[in-house]
Amino acid sequence: MDGVDFQLGPDLQGKRIVVAMSGGVDSSVVAALAARTGAETIGVTLQLYDHGEAVGRAGSCCAGRDIRDARAVCDRLGIAHYVFDHESRFRETVIDRFADEYLAGRTPIPCVQCNMGPKFTDLFGLAQELGADCLATGHYVRRVEGAAGPELHRGADPARDQSYFLFATTTAQLNFLRFPLGGLPKARVREIAAELGLGVAGKADSQDICFVPDGDYASLVRKLRPDADTAGSIVDLEGRTLGEHPGLIHYTVGQRRGLTLGGGGGEPLYVIRLEPESRRVVVGPRRALAVDAARLIDVNRLGSWDGPITAKVRSLAKPVPARVEGDLLVFDQPEYGVAPGQAAVLYAGDRVLGGGWIAETVPSALPLAAGGPSSPLPLAGGAPSSPLPLAGGVGGGAVTSPAACEQALP
């Protein structure tokens, strides 16, 4: 159907496919397509959390009603379905880290952490224990057989491409993983679900972060870390106090709205960096957001970084030309809204070359005021700057959206 290929050869009789099922339309269609190949198909769901609000909420992924939906699809298809409780591991590796990143003044991406841990590590192991020939998921990325082995490529539908969130997939994992929906648009996936009579055909996509069912990130962070709402000062680039803030967790690099500084008529101000030790929010003009480079840590390579590459520093950002020099990702042109805690994902055309986590940024040499050069932005906390000053810990998170920096810039 639609040329969907599980890349297990022409005859799948005697093959076993384990499908990661979240209860949504994408993974349900993958399970249905796998079952139609003649391979033995097993649906597996990880129960990752059990907030009371999520139990009756659809579209939250891996809890409550969504687990029941996954089971109902498997019952209709006549395939086995197993649910594994990984709530404690999910809390340790994803939820607790989510809260700690905010307190450290960084912008977390829990979806990547989930893929790196419970989904592509724990579920990977479970699938192998079940004797599977592959683990199939509903992600919109493509696995392409290259001359040196499997490669990870962007999904064919630009609006649905999820390659940014899968940059940490290892070569060993890629050998075992399959992404049969990567070449399809989402609209066609829903049509297939309807054609196959799946009850989730019209189910809404997951929204926000799965473990925050009401979208109130601040409440969750406060619950996990009671000191998260410690107030502090809002200061300009010279350290002059402009106002007060209720807590760093409400801010992110590039944010303009919600600064509540009063006044008006002057140049719009944006969050330039967060200083967790002094609890200061540093603001300045938009041009102060420009960075020339970012230092990457915990990198994952899926291809050579020596040739022409582009880099994506936010999930909704456009890839921009860049190069790698040691542990620095250097942009051809100044880039805006680069926040530590986010990921930088590298591409060669549509191929994902891997990436790393943004630890620090190098402020641009663009002038901060008309008629005069800028002085390098200091390190977070007011430490002296170096010739290429790295602004450590300058990211942050507007708790109204963990990726708020993607929408804050005009």
Image (spheres, helix red, strand yellow):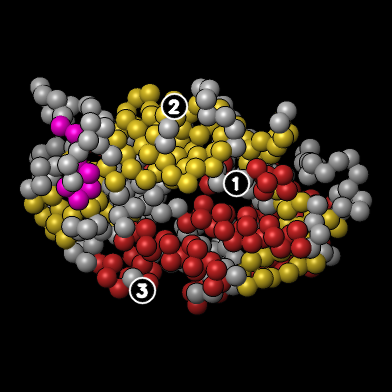
Residue at x 48% of width, y 28% of height = 310
Q: Earlier in the sequence, mark 2 or mark 1?
A: 1
> For mark 3, does the 10 Å Cα neighbourhood hold few (<14), some (14 to 19), or many (20 or more) residues?
few
Q: Is residue 210 above or below residue 335?
A: below
* Number of marks in picture: 3
Q: Which residue is mark 1?
A: 169
Q: Choose top left, top right, bottom left or bottom right for residue 199.
A: bottom right
Q: Which residues are magenta?
A: 375-382
Q: Which dot, 3 or 2, sits closer to the camera?
A: 2
Residue at x 54% of width, y 42% of height = 300
Residue 314 in percent (x, y) is at 43, 41
Label 3: state its secondary structure. helix
Q: Going by the image, does 227 lie left or right of 324?
A: left
The quarter of the rendered structure image containing the N terminus is top right
Q: Going by the image, does 96 lie left or right of 81?
A: left
Q: Earlier in the sequence, mark 1 or mark 3?
A: 1
